[in-house]
Every structure is written in C-alpha cells, then in structure tokens.
Image (cartoon, grey):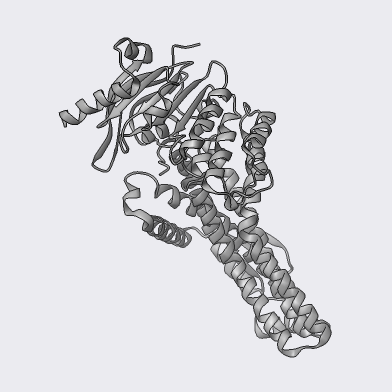
C-alpha cells in the first residue's frame, strides 16, 4: 500500500510544483536565446526572472506541500483519502516522503539556478576569479577553500534536514486544527498553532545548545570529525578549521519523531473530516 | 452471515453545544437495503461519517462486521459521499486506477462497463465535468466495488427526476450479492419500494427502526409511516 500511496502522492504534488520548474526552464531557454543573439536587456531580465524563480522555488514548494496536505486530508478529498484501507502512519509517511522529495528537488533547483546565473554572467574567466578569491580566504583570516566548501555543504544539508522536519511540524499543526477543541479557532488555527510549535521548538533547541554543544568539526587538514567538546570546537576554529553545530538537529529529530507519532495517533483516533 | 453488519450502541455526537446524535442505539441488518431517513440536519450524514471512519470524536460504540471503524472496515465499506472527493486533475481513468490500486474488491471490468453505460469519457478531467457527471463518476467507482456494506449519503440528492430512476436502477442492479445498502435520503417516495428496512432519525434520536414488512402489515406505506413518525416527533417538540 505504501508504494501505491507514494506513487499517487508524487503525481499529485508534481502538479502543484511543476509550474515553478517549467518557469525556470523557460527562463533558462530565454537566457540562452538572449546570449546567442547578444540581447543585453533580455539577458538581464531573464537572469533576474530566474533569480526570482530560484528564490520562489522553495517557498512555492512549501506552500504546495501545505495546500496538498490540507486538501487531501481535511478538504473534500479527505472523504476519499481517509476512507482508504490504510493505516494512518502509512498515510502520513507517504505524504511526508513525497513532500520531502519535492522540497529536496526545489532545494537543488535553487543551487543550480544560482550557479547558472553566476556562470551565465561571468563565464569561464569568473570561475577562475572565484577560485582566486577562495584561495585568498586564509589571508583574511577565513577558512581555506576546501574547508569552506565542506562547511557550506554541511550547512546546506543541515538546512535541508531542518526543512524535512519543518514539514512534520506543519502536518502536526494542520492535523491539530481539525481536532476538538483545537478546531474552535477556525481557519486561523493552523497559523497560531504553527507559531506556538515552531517558537517552542526553536526556543528549546537554542536553550539545549547552551548546555550541550555537539558539532561536526572540519579540521584545517580537511578531516571531518564529530565532537561534544566545546574547547576542541574553539581550538579547531582557531587553527583555521570550521564547525557546524548539531545539537539543534538532534533535538529537532527527536521532536519530529514525536510529532509524527502524535499526528498519526490524532489522524487515527481524533480527527474529524468536516 | 452475521445478523447485523453495523452495530451502534449509545452513540452521541455534538458540534459545540448542538447535540446531533443523542445516545442512539440500533443495528443495521445484514444483506438488506436499509433506508436512513430524516429531515435535513437530523444527523444522517454525521452517522454515516462515523460509520466510514471520517469522524472519531464521538462517544459510544460503533462496530462494522464486528470491528471498530478502521483499516478492516474501510476495506469492506464503499462510501458514496455527496462531496466531490476526486482530485480536480483526475481523469475518469485516473479515478478508476486509484480505486483499483487501493480497494481489493474493485472490479475494473465493471467500472469500464459502467463508464460506457454512463457515456463518460475516460480521458475527461474531473474539473471539466458538470456536477452530474462528477456524481456519475463517483457512483460508478462505488458500484464497481464488491463491498460488504455500501453507505450512500443522499445518492439522489441534487439529481433531476429523470436521472433518479436511472441512478436507482444502477445502484439496485450493481451492488454485490449478500451485501448491505445503507442509503440516507429525505426523498422517501423515490426509494420506498427498494427498502427492506428503515431507520428514522429525528432530534438526535432513533424515532423508528423497523422492517418494511411490519410497516406494510399496518397498512401503511413508508412515506405514510415517515409522516406519522415525523409528525409525532414535531408534536413532541
């Protein structure tokens, strides 16, 4: 059943997010044409459009994720989804996996677009210029190029992971808003509950970070290690390395698992489809 | 076959301060065509949503073939809702594929046959269909299941008189042998010849649960009995 659910959810979500990818594809096409015919204004406008699309991609995907979950679970389509002979955790996992997949795709599209815009305007020579800048970083007290690349990569992965967790927070508040007495607030419910949950999780994770600090260390020689030793984190940074804190991630993963269990339980035992 | 397919015991449900179902208890006999009758707002849809697992927030006990509403019952209950529950981008063939994917009792050749009979285009999207066509798609999907229990919420509601007899004919000729039909309606006249048993709801209570044979023995039609019961209910109020 899970495979069938994922197949159908993928198809459904694709309809919500495909327009942004089509728009990006068209913008890239226009950029190519403008480059070929050397149309200055066209190059500028199409690049600007692609930049806007790349920024919008994540926002549109998250909005589509929320809309799809609400419509398919608690809207008219909920009359079908919630009468399928499928357990609530399976239903929820399929929705989460599908949304996580499309957010990952959009995330990759953002990086691809940004790289494309940079390369489009500056060409081969700019790559060399960028390399030169990166090589000069240690001279101004910043980590070396390979350290910086690894750090950016790890921070990007961390943000992606936080986005996956964010989806579960959204699913939870939307579900809660369809359970009595939390449904009394009406359509403002999910927004209010979201700020409460998000604020609480952020506050708790930052507090936790003060008492327990765990981080991935990127040493000056490029080696990556895991540590919970605050002194070591400082010394690696001082020696030209970098660090990416993980405490927040640990805490949010635990919260995400709890939210998944609670949401599935609410779907199975408490939710009312209006 | 068990005597009753649905068992309702002391079920109450309220929306805020408004009590819709007030400690009701009854059985839906298996293998019969059961009419769930009552005026608008008397709790028919709420009861059907409880039976199909769409509402969890109620007190009392509901059993479908001996099981609480859940995965087991959902695999055996076919629900025809008055809501347009198909995704707008679905084509008729997508909807058929969807049901075929999730319901083991779905009879695909029958769905294709009904599609032809209704004159529906497999390639047409739901969003381009009229309300009547969308109702036909939902009906063909439900009637193509070999379910143990068909729960139909106002299947003739919003349908013009000419189409009513066609829809009724489709329902009566296509439901699985030995299965139970639970139909809610306030158009008693159209369906009274089809019922074997009726349950009349009003003011949150079961006003009557009776075999049609017993009503006929009193020299009354279903409509007359309905008026009698409902009339008394209004007087009580």
Q: Position of residue A146 (x, y in %)?
A: 74, 71
Name above or below for residue A68 compared with residue A155.
above
Give the side of residue A110 with respect to residue B227, left or right.
Answer: right
Quadrant holding the C terminus of chain A: top left
Q: Position of residue A137 (x, y in %)?
A: 70, 82
Image quadrant in which you'd find residue A8 = top right
**Closest to the observer, B54 or B47:** B47
Q: Residue at x 34, y 33 (%)?
A: B58
Q: Position of residue A37 (x, y in %)?
A: 82, 86
Q: How many marks?
A: 0
**Closest to the observer, B30 or B33:** B33
Name above or below for residue A140 compared with residue A99.
below
Image quadrant in which you'd find residue A16 = bottom right
Residue A92, visible in the rendered structure: no
Name above or below for residue B144 compared with residue A79.
above
Q: Residue at x 43, y 52 (%)?
A: A173
Q: Residue at x 35, y 49 (%)?
A: A183
Residue A184, visible in the rendered structure: yes
Direction front: furthest residue: B162
**Closest to the observer, A231 or A44:** A44
Name above or below for residue A237 compared with residue B104.
below
Direction bottom: furthest residue: A40
Quadrant holding the N terminus of chain A: top right
Q: Residue at x 52, y 59 (%)?
A: A248
Image quadrant in which you'd find residue A241 = bottom right
Q: Position of residue B30 (x, y in %)?
A: 46, 16
**Closest to the observer, B119 or A99:** B119
């Amino acid at each position: 059943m899970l495979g069938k659910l994922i197949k159908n959810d993928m198809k459904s979500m694709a309809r919500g997010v495909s327009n942004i990818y089509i728009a990006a594809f068209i913008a890239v096409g226009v950029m190519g044409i403008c480059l070929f015919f050397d149309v200055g204004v066209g190059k500028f406008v199409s690049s600007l459009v692609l930049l806007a699309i790349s920024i919008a991609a994540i926002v549109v995907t998250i909005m589509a994720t929320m809309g799809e979950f609400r419509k398919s679970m608690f809207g008219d389509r909920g009359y079908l989804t919630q009468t399928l002979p499928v357990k609530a955790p399976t239903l929820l996992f399929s929705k989460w996996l599908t949304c996580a997949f499309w957010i990952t795709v959009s995330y990759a599209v953002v990086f691809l677009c940004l790289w494309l815009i940079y390369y489009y305007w500056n060409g081969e020579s700019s790559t060399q210029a960028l390399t030169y800048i990166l090589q000069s970083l240690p001279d101004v007290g910043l980590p070396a190029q390979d350290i910086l690349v690894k750090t950016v990569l790890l921070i990007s992965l961390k943000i992606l992971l936080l986005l996956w967790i964010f989806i579960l927070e959204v699913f939870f508040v939307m579900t809660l808003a369809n359970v009595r007495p939390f449904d009394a607030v009406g359509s403002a419910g999910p927004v209010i509950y979201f700020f409460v949950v998000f604020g609480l999780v952020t506050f708790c994770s930052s507090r936790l970070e003060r008492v327990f600090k765990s981080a991935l260390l990127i040493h000056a020689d490029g080696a990556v290690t895991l540590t919970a030793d605050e002194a070591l984190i400082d010394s690696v940074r001082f020696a030209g390395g970098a660090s990416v804190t993980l405490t927040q991630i640990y805490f949010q993963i635990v919260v995400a698992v709890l939210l998944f269990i609670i949401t599935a339980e609410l779907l199975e035992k408490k939710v009312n489809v209006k | 076959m068990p005597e009753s397919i649905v068992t309702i015991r002391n079920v109450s449900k309220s929306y805020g301060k408004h009590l819709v179902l007030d400690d009701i208890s009854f059985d839906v006999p298996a293998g019969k065509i059961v009419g769930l009758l009552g005026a608008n707002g008397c709790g028919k849809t709420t009861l059907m949503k409880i039976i199909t697992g769409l509402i969890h927030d109620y007190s009392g006990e509901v059993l479908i073939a001996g099981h609480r509403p859940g995965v087991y019952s959902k695999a055996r209950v076919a629900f025809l809702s008055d809501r347009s529950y198909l995704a707008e981008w679905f084509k008729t063939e997508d909807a058929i594929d969807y049901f075929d994917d999730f319901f083991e009792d779905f009879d695909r050749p029958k769905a294709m046959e009904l599609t032809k009979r209704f004159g529906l285009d497999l390639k047409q999207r739901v969003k381009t269909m009229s309300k009547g066509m969308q109702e036909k798609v939902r009906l063909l999907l439900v009637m193509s299941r070999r379910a143990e229990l068909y729960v139909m919420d106002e299947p003739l509601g919003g349908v013009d008189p000419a189409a009513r007899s066609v829809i009724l004919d489709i329902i009566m000729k296509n439901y699985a042998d030995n299965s139970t039909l639970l139909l809610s309606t306030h158009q008693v006249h159209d369906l009274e010849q089809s019922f074997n048993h009726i349950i009349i709801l009003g003011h949150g209570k079961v006003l009557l649960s009776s075999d049609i044979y017993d009503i006929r023995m009193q020299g009354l039609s279903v409509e007359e009995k309905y008026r009698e019961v409902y009339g008394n209910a209004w007087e009580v109020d």
